[in-house]
Image (cartoon, grey):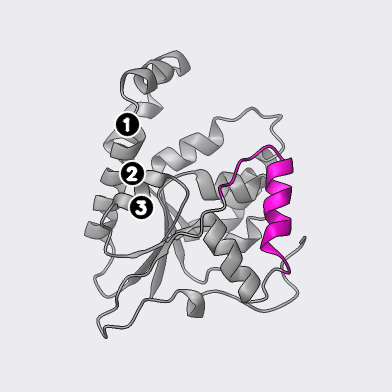
Amino acid sequence: MLDLVIPDSGPLITLGSVDRLDLINRFKCGILIADMVGYEIERGPETAPDKAAFSKWFKGRGNRVQTVDTTYGIMWSKLSEEDRKAVKRQNPHAGELAIREFTDRIRETIPAEDQVLVLFEEDAVKGMDFGIHLLHTYAFLLTLENLKVIPSAEAIVNQIHKAGRNLARDTFERRARVPSGDAADWQSDYDTSEGTSPGP
């Protein structure tokens, strides 16, 4: 069984900026996000162009999207915007610590036999020894192009950049090993059928 884990808000903000959260919807599995991811997404102004897309996505996913609480996230939710800025200035690595706590909780929660795919954009994630499959958003888009789910990864990236979002062309992917010794692969738990993805 596959579990999709999103430890930082990058992938959702990136795909939401061009209304392509449908590419996340195609995963045929549960989606686990850190509480900080929810806070990052919800804090944007109501007039933000991607605000409606996020609201629609969260409501439409129902129980498929599970939020995992972290100590940092609980504390963050109780701070004013001014205090949050002060915390960021005083502790620039706080976000990384929150991600580490989130992944530790994931390891304690998910059954050992499950396959875990981590979709991310924060560079700090690369250096963490999850023992699971790591995939950057850009590498994810390239794979979808190879699977013919989307005609062109580059076309979507260009749209993302025009929307004001700076997505690095990072092809990072680190596959985990399954008990059989083979490299883990998430594609069998992804809907690759044609005709359900709008846009480029």
Give the vertical position of 128 relative to 75 (above or below): below
Marks 3 and 2: which is nearer the front?
Answer: 3
Residue 36, quarter of picture: top left
Q: Residue 116 carries which label?
A: none
Precedes in sequence: disc 1 or disc 2:
1
The part of the chain drawn in magenta is 151-168
Q: Residue type at mark 2?
A: Ile
Q: Return the x and y of residue 19 as percentages of the image width and height.
A: 70, 51
Residue at x 32%, y 65% (from the top left corner): 132
Which residue position is annotated with label 2?
99
Residue 198, quarter of picture: bottom right
Q: In the structure shown, which secondary structural element does the residue marked by tag 1 occupy? A: helix
Q: Residue type at mark 1?
A: Ala
The answer to whether 175 appears left or right of 43 in the picture is left
State the quadrant of the C terminus.
bottom right
Give the vertical position of 81 relative to 144 (above or below): above
Which residue position is annotated with label 3?
126
Q: Residue type at mark 3?
A: Lys
Residue at x 69%, y 43% (from the top left corner): 161
- Is 152 covered by the magenta stretch? yes
Q: Return the x and y of residue 103 as percentages of the image width and height.
A: 29, 52
Which residue position is annotated with label 1?
94
